[in-house]
Image (cartoon, coloured by chain):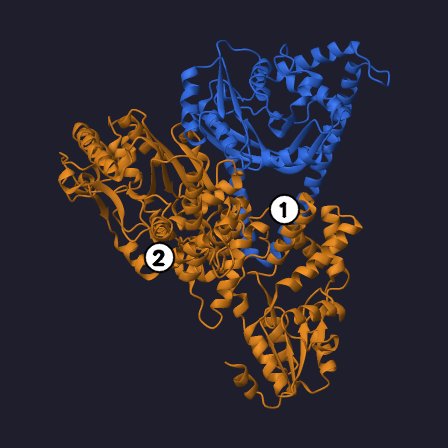
Chain colours: A orange, B blue
Amino acid sequence: MSATDVLDAHPKVTVLTVDFFDTMVTRRVAQPTHVFAVIEEELVSQHGSRWRGVAVERVHAEHRARVAAAATDALRDITIDEIADQLAELMKLNQAERDLFVRSEKATEIALAQPVPAGAAMVNEALSRGIRVLIVSDNYMPTSHLVAMAHAAGYGWVTDDDVLVSCEHGGFKHNGVLWNVALGVAGVPASQILHIGDDHEADQVQPSKLGIATHIDTRMRRSHRDMRNTSPDVLPLSLIEATQRDAMYDSNWDVAHALGDGLVGMVVAAQIADVKNVLRQRDLAGIHFAARDGWLAHQVWNKLRESDVSLPEASYTAFSRSVIWRASLTELTPANVGRFIGDDEELTVARLERRVGCSLSSLYRPDELIDAQASRAVLLENDREVVAAAQQLRQRVLGYFEKQGLLKPGHHVVVDLGWTGSTIADMADLITDTTNGATTIEARLTGMYWDAIPNRMRVSMHGYAMSEFESLDNNLRLLGVIKLLEALVTAPHGSVVDFADAAQDFQPMLVETQPELSAYEQLIGKVGQSAITSALALLQGTHASGVTAEDITGTELWAAIMQVGHTPRPEEVEALRIVRHVTSIDHEGEGTPLVAAAPASPKSFRQEQLPGLYDELIHGHWMQGSLRSWWSADGTRWIADEIGNIWPSTKVQWVPAP
Amino acid sequence: MRTYERPVLLARAIASVQNQSFSDWELIIVNNGGNPAEVEAVVSVARTTTGTSKITVLHLPERVGMEEASNQGLRATSSEYFAIHDDDDSWRPTFLETAVRTFTEHHDAAAVLMGVTRVHETFKGGKVWPEFHEKFPLDDSRLTYERLIGGNTFPPIAALFRRSILDAVGYFDSSLPVLGDWEFNLRAVRHGGFVFFPERLANYHTRTPESDRAAGNSITVGEDLHLRVKKELQARWDSEMEPHGVSKGQYSRDVEAEVAIAEAKLQAEIAEAQRAQSQRSTIRRLAGAVRDPKRAIRAAVHQVRVLAKRR
């Protein structure tokens, strides 16, 4: 509804009361607590590392101040001074430092203030009709500060008389106290007042009790995530998401575009920036983007090359855990046969034959389902054929690598998402063996976790956003979001399971699956398109948010991964429910859902089952997306809560207190 | 970087240096009598990304003491600052950048110390499994001579030293099989202050008892040796007098005893706080039971089952 429509619908209105934050004025960051991150960045830059961590401590300070105030008067709101006192206690600030923080918070709020389009339109329309506008806000800042913010956002007419703020009137909107004050100040019957705001309880339920008409608009809240996660590291994504919030203001929230323009665009830009950085430091014989996780980056690289001739050609090279491992196989034993068949898999001999690339003699019918143990026995009985097929595959793999330039003597960089580096380490062994060490491989990964340590002996690896040197909690958090990242940063084709022979130029043989095709068609393809556009803009310094690739260091990328992967919004979880993850070695089957279904009978689910459930979630699904989904349902919330209590790294807060 | 037959950990330790945002570093690896081929294999992989000149390897033909290994490494370089980076520890990427910047702000400092995270990990069959991590207790008060004399308060991975301190107080005492870092720190802190930077940029890795023995820390697999050497050092210091008229050895024993009492008191306070926390938790659980009796019954049944299993 337009401002005109809303006011036309209330012809008797003589006073328009307006909520302030996110109705009339908003900030140039994605959520209110990110203002504290901007303050921290500024204070650290101007006054040193003493101020590191102040953003998250500011959140704690406000909570403590509210608890302390509620102990004596449950109705009243707190003031910025009470918050500052708590902050001073938490961070051992002296009086001058405490006052510096308050000044900085006020100045930053004013600097970041911008008008909310619908709120501004409503206010302007009301003023043009001679309707009085009264700002009614639940906030800890004094009236003078709200007036200053209003002026900064373009509402030059606002004076102290036009503002009622909870911290100065003994009560909130959401407990009704401030509404009684507002009625008195308005000086007209409730039937002549219309209120606009964005909070169900404070701006609709409470004023309605007094007979005040209301209009609710929650669009500015669409960019919010968990308020406790605030640090300067989140600011690049925050600025991008604030820009998305403003750009999508007049339309429905486009989840695919938001994910692509935000997190995925940042991942791709970081992949490219990292390679460019390596290119500046050492001579490279080749740059290779790994299929499928490097598909988007390869697209962007080629587009950049159209205008930057200094960038060398880079390959898009197909390899997978299964083909590399099979190509390296020299002996089939009971110890390594397990890698062909998952413990829970049931297979036919025909599928086994496709998996190992040779005919197998067996007493089973080709289409008879057999369990993992029987399948492994069949392979061991045919070990010579399996190894011979592996050696033939090795020749095809090497033929393909040669075609891709990977055997060229010198130092090569392979770009992939991660995570243990074992496939690239296996690949490096294969290549180094073949070239007698003339070719060396370096893995540039987005993330690595602790399993990567032994692989460092075989290949040089760098984790851009995350490495095993991070805390155990962050290692676990990375494991919990890996499936999500793999699903988002992928290609429009399936995984490679074999290569054609020399006559067919060693073409990779890709396996398409219906679940992946369907998800790509409905969602992932759109994510990828937005990511390519976003990454190009970030790298060329033209992104609408003002963020550039230089702003996206490893810590900022990690923060973005956590903001989205660890604290997804409900609509993101909902949209990603269609995605399934196909992990079998032959890339066949239906795969597993990214967002795990909750236990079928939550009431009879037992605590003893939690460790098994945790393992299944963290290894097979997008853990945090699944947990947030369970949290939102009454029946399964207790399971998600219990997992959070037992494994605290899964809780929504990922920015730790200093 | 001292190393002895732990190639997996060595690879991690080298990467921790290569990951530094401060790029003007030089790494001297002292292979303390271990298999040269094993070390060279790891180093050759690492050199593919940072070139040959930044990493030097000294292969000692026979195993020497830890401090002698450090001294040989130090004599092979003339850099302005130095750190002893054990092959099982690691730094966060901004360790060197932050430490060097801190030195420029504290011209008289002999060393800059970073906050430390202690990582407990299990090393078995060539794989490392982190078990849990905790904040290592370190602050300004633990970095004075008056506190250090009672015992060492930080692992080597936490510190970056100004090289000129070697000219002033000498190198590490090669005769000491362990605790050479403590003895050196005592000499160094008397010459110039130790500045503490609280951000936890150093990771002090220790292996759990389940780990393969070869991967153990000197401190966790040789507690008896540490105690013996400490007593020997204190006995050696009995002939040196402190300005306040007490021998250095006695002063060390006195402070050690004071610290032990203070630590015991602190542990008791922590235990008391945990007990109070547990009481509050019980009250919360009871309140929760009133709000959601079904869940409380489920939890109680689970508790009974767990207890029954234990019996």
Residue positioned most to the bottom: A12
Looking at the rendered structure, whether the residues under marks 2 and 1 are on a common chain is answered as: yes
In space, the residues marked 2 and 1 are separated at their CA atoms by: 35 Å
Image x and y of residue A341, in percent: 27, 38
In the image shown, does A72 or A202 lie closer to the viewer? A202
Q: Are marks 2 and 1 in contact (CB under 8 Å)?
A: no
Label 2 neighbour load within 10 Å: few <14, some 14-19, many 20+: many
Chain of the residue where label 1 is placed in the rendered structure: A
From the viewer's perspective, is residue A346 above or below residue A382?
below
Residue at point 62%, 11% (across, down): B174
- Write down the residue under mark 2: A524
Q: Residue furthest front?
A: A309
Numbered circle sitting on residue A613: none
Q: Secondary structure at mark 2?
A: helix
Q: Quadrant of residue B143?
A: top right
A537 and A376: which one is in front?
Answer: A537
Percent of width and height locating residue A134: 68, 79
Q: In this orientation, does residue A58 appear?
A: yes
Q: Which residue is depicted at the point 42% across and 25% down?
A: B126
In the figure, is residue B78 to the left or right of A160?
left
- Kindly identify which numbered label has been placed on residue A657: 1
> Measured from the top left, where is residue A320 in percent x and y?
30, 40
Left/right placement of residue B251 relative to residue A179 reads right
The amino acid type found where label 1 is placed reads Ala
Quadrant of the rendered image containing residue B110: top right
Q: What amino acid is labelled 2 in the image?
A: Ile
- Residue A207: quarter of image: bottom right
Q: How many numbered marks have been drawn onto this rendered protein structure?
A: 2
Nearer-the-camera pick, B202 or B125: B202
Q: Is residue A357 left or right of residue A191?
A: left
Residue B264 visible somewhere in the drawing: no
Q: What chain does mark 2 sit on?
A: A
